[in-house]
Every structure is written in C-alpha cells, then in structure tokens.
Amino acid sequence: MRLPFYPFLFFCLINFNAWTAEPVPLTRLRCDSRDHPLGVESRQPRLSWQLVSAVRGQKQTAYRILVSDNPQTLAAGQGNFWDSGKRVSDQSIQVPYEGKLLLASQLYYWKVQIWDKDGQPSGWSTPATWQMGLLTQADWGKAQWIALEELSASQRIVPFVHDPNGAKPLGDRKSAQNSLPQFRREFRLEKPLKRATVFISGLGHYELSLNGRRVKDHFIDPGWTNYDHYALYATYDVTTTLRKGANVMSVLLGNGFYNIPVERYRKIVGSFGYPKLICKLQLAYEDGTHQEVVTDQSWKVTQSPITYSSIYGGEDWDATKDISGWMEAGFDDTCWQTPLVVQGSPQLRSQTAPPVKIMETFKPVRITQPKAGIYVIDLGQNMSGIPQISVTGKTGSVVKITPGELLGDDSLVTQQSSGQPHFYRYTLKGIGTETWHPRFTYYGFRYLQIEGAVPAQGLLSTIAMPSADIPVLKAVKGLHIRGSAETVGTFSCSNELFNRIDRLIDWAIKSNMVSTLTDCPHREKLGWLEETHLMSGSARYTYNLATLLPKIIRDMQTAQLANGLIPDIAPEYTAFASGFRDSPEWGSAGVILPWYTYQWYGDKRILVESYDMMKKYVAYLGTKANNHILTHGLGDWCDLGPKPPGESQLTPKGITATATYFYDLTILEKTARLLGKTADADQFQQLAQAVKKAFNETYYDAQKGQYGSGSQTSNAMPIYMNLVTPDNQAAVIASLLKNLRDNNYSLTAGDIGFRYLLLALGQVGASDAIYAMNNRADVPGYGYQLAHGATALTESWPALRFVSNNHFMLGHLMEWLYGGLGGIQQDENVPGFKAIVIKPEVVGDITHTRVRYHSPYGPIRSEWKKNGTQLELMVSIPANTTATVYLPTANGSPILESDKALDQQKDIKVLRTESTQTVVTIGSGSYVFKINNL
C-alpha cells in the first residue's frame, strides 16, 4: 500500500521549486526602440522586452506575444491582430511583428510572456502600446500646407550659398522673410471624447498650443532635413488637453534651416520657402464616430511678435505686438488673414528621434559690469542653449542679449570663434514682470552680455540700484537644450582628472545632439559625418541613440549623389569645395555607421535599408583610387603639427583615406554575408585584399618598421584595421610605442587618427600608454583644455581661442573610459550586447572604477577596486545574456568568486589561463571576483 506513495512524494518534492519559484518579471516593453511610441511607420515594427532576475544564468527559452487593437481583447488573453503562439527562441529584442496589416493612426496594445531557463512560464507583462503614424499621403486626408506668404520658385536659393562674410542679399529677398506667422483654428467638441491625436509639421519649426497651453515641451520641432526630399512630422496624444465645447489650436512658426535670412551672422544663406504649416487633428468619440480638423483656409493667420528669427543670427520678440487672448476661444480674428494654400515637402515622415527639449537650467555664478551700461553674466558652463529673462520696464524698452563662449581682453563677450553677430532683442510690453526666451534658434555659450537693462539688486548684491527709466532684470537663466535621448551610461573612477575629462566630453556630446549630431552649437550647426562614426562609440555609451542614428543614416541616403559620393555633411544644404565635400574619412560614415548601429542595437533592418548606399559609396571610392590607393580629402584633421589646426600635417592623406577604404570593404563584406549576398561578399573580400596589398607596398617602410611618416595615426590605423601583415605586426607595434615614448607620451593624432590610436593601443594591451597620454595637463590634450578653463570639449587640442570651444570632435577617450578602464564591451560577432565582454584595464594610480551601461537587454555593471595587491571586480550581467570576463592576474594568482574558488562555482567556466589574465564565461547575475597577489 505504501509503494505507490513514494514516487508521488518524490515527484512533489522535485517540482516544489518549480511550483513556488517567482516568475521572471518582464519590463521595458518597447516598439521600434521607443516606449509607447506614437507615429510608428514600419509595417513590421520591432518589439523588445527585458527580463529582470537575480538568478544566475537566467535566460529566455521561449516567448509568446499578443497584439490587439483594444485593451479588452488583450486583457482576455486574445491577440486579434497577432498571436505569435509559443515560439522556442531566446530572442527578446528586435522581434518583428508578424500579424495582420497595421492601419494608419491606429492604436495597438500588446503584451508578452516568456519561458525561463527551466521551461517555466512567466506571468504576462504589463500591457504596452504603440500608435501608427500616417503611412501614405492619402492618410493626411484633406490637410493642406498653409502659409502667410509664399516664396516664388525663382526666389528659392537651393542649394544654399556658403556666404559667411558677404553682406549683400542674394536674389530678391523681401523683408517679409523675417516676419513669422501665427495661426489659429477654433472648433467644438459636443460628444464624449475617446482619443485625440495631432499630426503636425511646421517648417522650419513650430510651437503648438491647445487652449493657450503648449502641447508637449519640445523645442525647435521638427528636426531638420533636406526639405526637397522629405520633412518630419510629430505625433501627439492630446486627449486630456481638449474640453467639451469650444477649443482652439494655435501655432507659431520659425525659420530654422528652412529659410535662412541674410541679416546678422550666417554660415550659409538659402531658402526652401517661407514658413508653412500642415496639421491634422484626429478625433475619435466614445460613440464610435470620428472627426478631423485639418489645416485649410478655414484657419486664420497673422504676423507674430517674432520680428526676426534665424538659426544662425538669433531672434527678436516685440511684446507690444503680442495680441492678448488670441490662443483662447471666443477671440475675434475677423481682421486676420485667410492663409494661402501652398506646396510643402514632397514626403512627410514621422519624427522618431528623441525631440529636442530644455534639459537643464543654469543660474548666474557671477555678474560684472566691464563697461557702463553693459553687464556680463557668467553661467559657469559652456553649453548649447538659449537665455531666459524676467524683466520689468516701460513699454517699448529694448533689452539686447548677446551670448558667447568666451570673453575678450575687454571682459566683454566675444563671438570671434563662434559666429557673429548672433544676439536677441526683447521689446517690453510694459505690463508687470515679463518672462521671455527665444523659441526657434539657439547658440553655444557660457556668458550672456546684457544691454538696455540693469540686474535687480537681489540678483547679485554687487549691482547698484537701477534708474527708474531703465528696465530691471529680475532673473536671468541659461536654458540648456539638446536631444532628449535617454541617459544610459555613467562613469566614475578614483582619478579626478579622468572624471573631469568624462564631463568635458559629455558636454560636447550633449551640446551637439539635436536632430543630427552637429559639429558645434553656434558657428555651423552642420552634420559633419566623420564625427558620427568616430564619436558615436563615446556617445552610445552615455545616451540611447537607437532612434537618432537611423535618422542620420537616412540623411546620408538622401544626400548621396548619383555617382555614389556621400558628401562630408548631411543634410547637404550647400556643396562645399574640395576635401570639404569629398573626403573618404567623412563619406565612409555611410558604410561604417549603419554597421555600428546594427552591432550596438541588434536591428538588421538598418543594414537592409542601407546596403545600396553602402555599396554605391564603396564603388565610388573605387573610381577615385589609383592602383587601389586614395590620396584625396582632409586627412587627419586637426592633428598637432607646427601649423595652425586644419588639414593633416603629420600623416600622409593616403594612409587615412586608403585605410578607411579598406575598413569599408571589410564591413561591406560582413554586411553582404549577413544579408545572404554571397557573391557580393566574395567580391568585396577580394577587393579588400588587393587594397591591403597595395597599401603595404605603398606605405610600409620595412627598414623602419613603420607606415608612412611613422606618426601616431600612420601606425595606429593599420594596426586596428588589420592592414598589417602578421610578419610585420611586432615591428609596427614597437614603432608606435617608441613614437609615444620618444615624445614623452604627448599626443599628436587628430580628429581621424586619435580614436584609432586608442583602439590600437587597447588592442595590443598597451592601455598604460593611453593612461600616460591622458593623465596630464602640461601638453595639449584634455587636461590642458581643463587647465585653460574649458568646460566643454574644444575644437583643438590646445584649446585655441579662435576656434570653437564646444565641439563634437576629439572626444574619443570616453569610449576607452567605458570600454577600456571600465571594461564594458560587446562581442563584435553577436549584436545588441547579447554576448558581453568585461575586460577592465587596471592602469596607473587608479584604485577604483565604477561603470554602468543600460544595454538593450538590461543594465550592465563593471566595478573594480584595487587595494595593494588585491583586486576586487564586481560584475552584473542582465538576464538572457552571457559574458566573457577577463580577470587580470599574475602567474599563480588565486581567484575567488563570492569567497569560493572558481572550481567550486558551477556558474563559472574557466576558458583559459594566460600569463597576465584568466578568462572565464558567466551567465546573467551578479558576481564578485577577488584576485590576490596581483
């Protein structure tokens, strides 16, 4: 009678853990790399989620996704648009939707369930949503482009003219170009509302309000593009903003890059047309009916109080022209004009990159009066931004604000290095305290020069009481604007100089992250392409660029010429001359950036969409090559030579151009194989070998064991890009290290070469040389810039005053701080950080380092501290990933993990032991390694 009971009891015992174990929670459900996104245009959006578990080695073995067009059906466990069924797969990012055809502007609800490493199901995730955008021109319905005025085709200036110093107007430019329109449309809601969605594009930029309140906190929306190809529109859920009865939509427009005036400073002058607007408000009622409010001639328009606006020159606001109540219902707009119906961009695409917003606020740290009636305010930080003032005074009084990065010898603001004149003028309405900031332009600055007003005594006590006839500044602020990309990485270490360098570079990244990655936030604001691939490594560690980089890649696709050339800037508003239009290190962003984006975020779609561009550009380089050698372009821009910074001085241009060409070919070969284009891949492989052979025959000096001039760049690029033949490898590495030692570890590499110098040194195990080069302030470099007062990365290693002092260039050390010193890397053969590499570099006098990076799979932590000969490394790996950990050891160094020997830990596998390191593999979870006798 007892025998049958024992098997049953045993069965219960072995399944007790399965019955009582906590299911794996699921979080961060994302569609096309965004949380609850609006304006999704892909017919097959990619769905991603993250597993949260402290269990070591936890992973997903299967998943099930449900997608529905209403929450009730989803709650009932049904996916009426897609039920994937249980799929045996560990894929938890970039899973393509495979359900019914998705409909324009429709809202979809989805959730996911997974099975863990033991085959146990999780609970269902919290539901997430996405809303589709307007997928075709027909989806805009009866919406029309409307404007206050129309620029005739003969007056357009496209491409723009590079005219930074010329004074005379180009063509027949009417003064109306500086009069910006404001639009309004009143409508009524008479039924209970279910959902209201706005789709809007205003060119160059717009500011949308409903019932007198700003819709969202976006700044200079939409992002800029080549408007003759396409423009961007944004999507907003405004359900809670509307009310029963009368409602009013109101819109202000600015010029942006759509229309650049000739007055004041301009890097380029041109016009696609005068500002214009298209908008569709889609109303869904509880009773199932629908209504649309669209831009047409039922709207009203007049000139706004903005009397001047230029992306380069600044902005003026005349508050005496501000019409009270025009944003509210019941306003009498009978004297306003009926808008013109005009032509806009031929295609509208959803803006999916993070919108630009006001991200930080800075208050004065010092106010001086270097000249009678002129006050200079120091905000303490060089940034991209706009000023904001609160002021009282008489009607018609004018306050002038001039921003700048630097002060001149006279202690006044100077714009010599950043483009002049750029300023703002505010004309007071004369009623109470008036607060104002520019809406459609920005600049790079630390200082604000104020004329026409006096700081209030309370602003800073050193200022005397003002005259009653002069406006009084109650408050002055600097508003830092940038793309609102999520911060995903943090770095700190025991070396305070490296911490300051990290912040220095971070400010250059933040200040140049808008709708593209610009070179500087003042003088040019252009998307110089070499920075997108050379600096994106640093930027990707700190910010989530998963949706910004595809927009930049689309700009390159748009800019590519019929012959395959990708120009140095995108959007290409003007065609610069010579190497400033055609430099291989710049144009190769069209090949390198799609590959980096795929590797980092794991979405193969970017390679599919970019392949033709990549292939055409490499073919173009082939037509420029002489015996497979390229010698044109700018070379190692801004390297440190005897002349002022500019084109390469120390490294032959053929080395950087041809090495980049070879690198392109190796990337294109891998891309072709990944996409199943085997014949293409074989062709690229053969061509790459021919380029490699020609490169070595042309530039390798066997007697000296070096390439070209033997400069840092000349040797570093061949090492990193695998151009060095195996029998020459030791000699070239020795030559590179000797060059550094002979120059007392002073850096000379420029914009192109410095990143590859860091990568090459890391590759050959010479991070101590990286430390020696950068742990100093006595020679040009990061420390030197800091020592000379820089608060953002400057355009030149020696922080010259006549170049930009906030520049998205030369910030490559941040990539090493995260990936070298901190040690967080990815297996380049497994995209998206599913296979992680932890390889910290213990160098110099650094005693601890703390790095966090939130990968597509979840947060990664690498933290080490050194105490004498003992090293402790703390590692956290997200669920559904694995990691290879390189533990720095000396021969015979004992290693413990969680105070146990490695051979006692079943979750750790030792791959190999070498003289200077032990390599182990681990699954997800947290680990604490201790190495003694280091």
Image (spheres, rainbow, N blue to C red):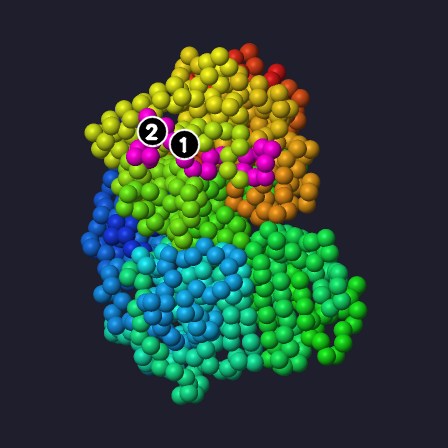
Where is residue 255 drawn, in percent x and y?
A: 44, 66
Say which residue label 1 marks: 631
Q: Nearer the viewer, residue 917 or 545?
A: 545
Q: Is residue 634 magenta?
A: yes
**Residue at (41% x, 32% y) in the render:** 631
- Name the mark on residue 722: none
Residue 180 in view in this figure: no
Cα distance between the residues tagged 2 and 1: 9 Å
Q: Is residue 379 left or right of residue 266?
A: right
In this rendering, position of residue 852 left or right of residue 22: right
Q: Quadrant of residue 159?
A: bottom left
Main secondary structure of the magenta stretch: loop
Kindly state the secondary structure of the residue where label 2 is placed.
loop
130 is higher (above) or lower (below) than 504: below
Seen at 20% across and 55% down, the residue is 101
Identify residue for label 2.
626
User: Mark 2: which amino acid?
Assistant: Asn
**What segment carries the magenta color?**
621-645
Q: Are marks 2 and 1 in contact (CB under 8 Å)?
A: yes
Q: Residue at x 69, y 54 (%)?
A: 408
**Few, some or many residues within 10 Å of mark 1 (<14, 14–19, 20+):** some
- The x, y position of residue 243, in whole percent, is 40, 77
Comparing 845 with 149, the one in front is 149
Secondary structure, mark 1, is loop
Residue 376 x %, y %:
70, 61
Q: Residue at x 56, y 39 (%)?
A: 645
Q: Quadrant of residue 890?
A: top right
Q: Quadrant of the N terminus?
A: top left
Question: From what the image shows, is residue 100 above or below residue 780?
Answer: below
Residue 640: percent from left, percent from top = 58, 34
Q: Earlier in the sequence, mark 2 or mark 1?
A: 2
